[in-house]
Amino acid sequence: MSCSSIAGAILARIQEELETLRTLRLFDVVDFARADETFRSVALRGSEPLNDP
């Protein structure tokens, strides 16, 4: 998997926006470009893409 790193300001904005959501769910925001390959492969097993039509 090849991906570009997310700028720190954008990552912070995403985290701030998620904190304002009224939900009982928890969200973990991960920049996979900065994560090691082992973590990335394990984390992606249960993930769902948000940009699929």
Image: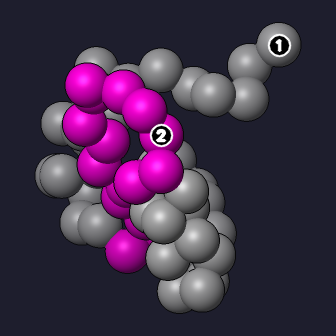
Above or below, 7 against 29 in this view is below
Q: Is residue 49 magenta?
A: no
Assign the magenta stretch its main secondary structure.
loop
From this view, report whether residue 38 is shown above or below residue 51: below
Residue drawn at point x = 73 percent, y = 29 percent? 51
Q: Which residue is mark 1?
A: 53
**12 shown above or below 42:** below
Give the image location of residue 31, x and y in percent: 43, 64
Q: Relative to residue 32, is residue 48 depicted above or below?
A: above
Please say whether residue 49 is visible from this viewpoint.
Answer: yes
Residue at x 48%, y 65% (from the top left corner): 16
Residue drawn at the location 82% of the way across and 13% of the way down: 53
Q: Which residue in the structure is indicated by mark 2? A: 21
Q: Which residues are magenta?
A: 19-34
Q: Residue at x 25, y 36 (%)?
A: 26
Residue 32 location, x and y as percent? 41, 59
Asked whether 18 or 10 is in front, the reply is 18
Secondary structure type for disc 2 = loop
User: In the picture provided, is 12 more to the left or to the right than 19?
Assistant: right
Residue farthest toward the right in the current orientation of the protein: 53
Q: What distance separates the C-alpha of mark 2 from that of mark 1?
A: 23 Å
Query: In the image, what residue type sits under mark 2?
Result: Leu
Q: Position of residue 13 (x, y in %)?
A: 58, 71
